[in-house]
Amino acid sequence: MLNRESNVFPGILGRTCDRPCEPACRRGRIDGKPVAICRLKRVAADHRGEIAARLPKIPAKKNGKRIACIGAGPASLTVANDLMPLGYQVTIFEKNDKPGGLMRTNIPSFRLPASVLDEECQTILDFGVDIRYNSPVTSMRALLQEGYDAIFVGSGAPRGKELDLPGRRETDRIHIGIDWLESIAFGHTDSIGEKVLIIGVGNTAMDCCRSSRRLGAKDIKVMARRPRPYFKASPWELEDAEEEGVEIVINHSPKRFVVENGKLTGMEFERLEWDAKAKNSKVLDTVFVPADDVILAIGQENAFPWFERDLGAQFDKWDAPVVDEKTYMSTREGIFFGGDAAWGPKNIIWAVEHGHQAAISIDNYCHRIPVTDRPAYGMNLISQKMGLSEWSYHNDYNPAPRQKMTHVDLAERFKKLNIEVELGFSPEQTAKEVQRCLNCDVQTVFTAEKCIECDACVDICPLLCLTITRDGSEEDLRGRLSAPALNLTQELYVSAPLPQTKRLMIKDEDLCVHCGLCAERCPTAAWDMQKFELITPYAGRTACCAQA
Amino acid sequence: MLRAGVEQAVRVNDFAIKLANVNGTGSASANGLLMQAIFRMGIPVSGKNLFPSNIQGLPTWYEIRVSKDGYTARALDYDLMVAMNAQTYERDIREVRPGGYVLYDSTWPLDPRLHRQDVTFLGVPLAEMCNAHFRESRERILMKNIAYAGALIAVLEVDMDVVEQLLDEKFAKKKALRESNHKALRLGFDYARKHFDPLPFRLEKMDANSGKILIDGNTATALGCLYAGATVAAWYPITPSTSVMDAFTDLCRKYRKDPETGAMNCCIIQAEDELAAIGMVIGAAWNGARAFTSTSGPGISLMNELLGLAYYAEIPAVVMDIQRVGPSTGMPTRTQQGDLLECAYASHGDTKHICLYPANPSECFEFAVKSFDLAERFQTPVFLLSDLDIGMNDWVVPRLKWDDSYRPDRGRVLDAAQLERIQKFFRYWPEDENFVAARTLPGVSSKGAYFTRGSGHSRTGAYTEMPEEYQEVVDRLLRKHQAAAKWVPEPVIERRTGAQFGVVTLGGCDAAVREALDVLDSRGIPADFMRIRAFPFPESVEEFLNDHEFNFIVEQNRDAQMKSLLLLETGVAKDKLRSICVYGGFPLSAKRVTDRIASQLGELTERAVHR
Amino acid sequence: MPSIAKPTAIHPSLHRNELGLTIRDYEGSMSTLCAGCGHDSITAAIIRACWEISLAPHMLAKMSGIGCSSKTPTYFVSGAHGFNSAHGRMAAIATGASAANRELTYIGVSGDGDSLSIGLGHLCHAIRRNLKMLYIIENNGVYGLTKGQFSASADVGSKSKKGEPNRMAPIDPVALALSLGATFVARSFSGDKDQLVPILKAALSHRGFALVDVISPCVTFNDHAGSTKSYLYTRNNMLKATETDFVPPASEILATIGRNGAVSVTMHDGSVVRFKGVPPDYDPTDRKKVLDYLSEHHGKGEVVTGLLYIDESVPDMHELNNTPAQALTKIPFEKLCPGSAALDTLQEEFR
């Protein structure tokens, strides 16, 4: 349930998330690889017990407020998830006949089984959401006239970007990536040529190339303009694609589609040479790469042809809606945006966050509270000391490397389109991976007046985080620490002057593994390990009562 | 010339003389000269120096026994007393057997009260002659001794050529001294020739000493250490062990100086006390050197603490215990076998140590080498229990032999290559068939690094206070000790036809007990003989004891320590063992043994009759 | 799971010494001393010194006796052999160990009970022999393991935890060593590694016996008000008589002579100890002046620290014994045993 609290779709996100959390994970600073947070969420979701009883209770008596959501993607579903327990009546308009939005249309089923998607969407719909399939909203004006108390636009970024090069319109073997994926998802496409070129190296490109592989393509090339460090795709998705025999070709800039006798034969590319920072390039030569099909995966954008521009909601010069970054409200009161519909394509977890925030705004709005009046985050700090060498958290450091996800055998996985490639972590892998966590939630808390400057903490610290030294400028201090503090994005913790010598206790948090040895070896309990809990507010629930 | 008693048959090469002196006067060299001359005449001889714990002025005696049959134990019947110490005249003259002789300095008249009818007094005006011939007072004192030696040479018929040769060797580089000695010798010799008739006992050249040497046990022990390859020796001066280290130092000067670099391939450290001495030995052995200390009972007492450490942490150490009379300071210049139990169980807690009991300088040499092999094989302290008699007196023994194919038994020590092959090193596990685990030496490889500790440890070497982990280690130590029984010297056993009981002894009692058994046999009382040479006891020790209805245990201490050790460490029944303890501090004589056995046998017979 | 094992994670910017080792490679097992014990800081200083001079771990021998201080060799350089011997006997055991193998570096860690009471004699004689070793006294003025009795280094008037003052005069290891002819004498404080580490490095280069007395507060039994061996008292009364730099052998010496006529002393191994700051009239090579300075400032209740006295001219035990440059344990048996022919010749003398 903790898993579901903030990310709403643990099973889905545990498989498909872009993992913005993992680069932030400090484990990566220690051994280069963050904790596999994403895959651990999947473990928790896959192995959850019965949760029905723990789900929010939906009041039988409604509060009389009606909310319309456009699109049944993650953002709208999150809004419904947060508002339904408060007594709102939520109606979702969906153009397709199934919920999920891009989670269904753009993510191939070998990455996200339909059963997982269905179940997690259904959990929300079962709160009593009024879901209307096959009901694309064709006019915002019309919708407004239906008298909803608020409208949430979660219609995504459904338009794939074009590549208007010579030859583009001379053949039907050039596909827009997201549309192509959608047609596979709904069973409209089940084959492709032997030689396939994918233009672009984002995650959509990866889904396209791997889908091509499953539809029978033999020779698949992903064509990239820039060198590998500048790819948009997540590294793991690149690895997975390459594992499946996809070739990734760098420094090739598309020049034209080659169509002979109405038949696509391939593409011409300019081979580029980039400077050190891949800012400027020069053309080396032009090469021809044969292809039966080309899939364009160079980005997507939101589009609102059904949103009349005279309703009070402003659109900017790129024809994108003007949306407040905190409140998610458009310039037309009562209309909120979230997900890719707000600021163009991001990813699912951001859509979920938008949903949460929009739900808070909607709740305020419906109760005549200014939408800018947002509930504060809360926090708890609880000492973890239980006894000598005894802590109420797992303070041991596990040197295990990041656990490798086991994949279905290559031959096996191509037999059907929807065989899930990732098997998930075994219990042993899970245990090891969990222990890789550095317990950032358990903070080293220092009380200067208790310190006798015995050096015990400085001496014991395995990562040389601590220093007792005289004061100085930050730059000076950073160079004088037990180990140089090179990560300038990590602030130094500096204590009040210490009682005996007036020197300062300085902690460089950068590589702290929260082993607790400083507190363990502290004779005066000047150091303590305290569990930090961030309490996130949700619609209708302020931080202080979020625990309840 | 006063002559008493009746005419006697002349005895050749079978008599005993005793020389009573004041210590610090230089008599030792005169006495040694006589002893050595007799040895060179090819006659079986033994000399016992009964000296005081003093530098100057206290009584000192020297006994020389000549025995054509080869008996070397102390004889208590003195044929001739050389009475040079007025303080002890009374006692000395009393000790002469009836019909014997007293040679004294007749510069002053003898107190008539000391006169005995049954001995002959031979007066030589030694002081007077020396005063007349030597100017310096110190020289007079020294030469008086040489003068009485000259007189003895005359009356005992010592080969003068041999004596002259000895003086030539001794004073090869000191011509003036050679002259003085020669002069003094002639003074006594000429006086005796002129004034005395031949005595009823005398010397005659034999050929019993070819292939033999004259050596003291401490020198032999030091030689053993040298040959065993000992490089570190640490000690604190204590009688009667000091001469072990003196000899080792001399030997090292001679044999351990590197011909190329001039460096000394040894390190001999005079420690601040015995605690330090054994500490140094343990430190050196921990580092892989063959190291030893020499000491005596009081030193062992002080070493007890660290001996326990070496035992428990399993570090080799060799301790040469030259026993003297205890308890406490006791009598430092008298001999005893009083450290048997102390060495066997040295230190607090459960400890047992390997002990070797040499009987003479030959065995001192042999066992000294063996001590190092045992100490390293079993990674434990090893005691060589010599005593003052063996250690400081000159003994005639067969020439020492050395097998050039000998290589030290270093026991189980892992080198870098062996360490590389194992996954992980644990100090006290696994063990071999002798219950010994491999050790490693510092400076070889970090993989072999471990923490040596005398505190509780498990088989991995880690600190422990857990009963089962502690017991596992100390139980193995016991098994290891027992396993050593197969590696230590077997007892010497000699059986006689018709023997009805066993006589068991050890160490320096050997000669006296053998002689006693000959005497008993000649009286129709044959007995079997066993000399125990080591602890833990080989199986044959218990077998011998059980083979006999009863056994006499002859030893030189009050408390029957060897008997106690046998009762504690074998399954033999208590009533099978009877004690004969002689512990006054002088070397054992056969007479004491025969008398005590005879009397105990008499008591036994009587008791049997009364029953 | 609660754990007190030190994490194996290594700071990526950790430097490596000439042997390619990081400072963490010089650690030992986790300390079992009381949290905050000064001894643990000294352990950390030893680790740093050994790492900085690139001492090969297996070439170090860690020696100790019994007591809190004597446990500490377990806590540093686990790649070295250690010997936790018997109470007070460390100096003797180290002497033997050094006799056998002079190629190793010896660090002895002792305490005030170990060195100034039960093992005082051994300490004195190790000084007399000028045994080449670093001998550290972790001095806290109290018997910790037996729960708080005064030790021989407790100052007159220093109060026990129960409030009773000590009345007997202390034995000052620094003054004692100087009077015995010690050739390297220093005092420092566990809470001042800037001072301690260079002293330890210099001590490890010294020709003979290097005594380093380190005030090392006992947090459990002797860190209260009234104690003269507490963190606070030591900080308030510590007088840094000298400040030193240690320059390893073959380093370029950028000679800047310190103020007040400071001196540089070239060590036996070619390294240099540079005295950066010494008081006027202080000469760390003049035993008498050092003793006078100590007694003057001791009288004022000051704890005089620094590398106080140094003399590189005195031969060590091995030089005095004329032992070979290599370890005695490396001399082949063939060189040690004279053989049967020599025995035959020798025995001609025994006739």
Image (spheres, coloured by chain):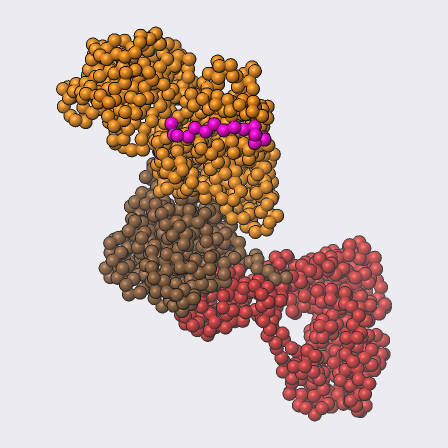
From the image, which quarter does the N terminus of chain B lie in?
top left
Q: Quadrant of residue A261?
A: bottom right
A198 or B181, which lies in front? B181
B126 or A97, which lies in front? B126
Q: Is residue B417 left or right of residue A137?
A: left
Q: Is residue B278 above or below residue B183?
A: below
Tell me, yes or no, if residue C185 can be seen here: yes
Q: Colour of chain A?
A: red
The residue shown at (61%, 76%) is: A380
Q: Is residue C233 above or below residue B565?
A: below
Q: Colour of chain B?
A: orange
Q: Is residue A437 left or right of residue A501?
A: right
- Chain identifier, colour brown: C
Magenta-colored stretch includes residue B580: yes
Q: Position of residue A384 (x, y in %)?
A: 59, 69
Magenta residue span: B572-586
The residue shown at (41%, 22%) is: B589
Q: Is residue A252 left or right of residue B129?
A: right
Q: Position of residue C188 (x, y in %)?
A: 37, 59
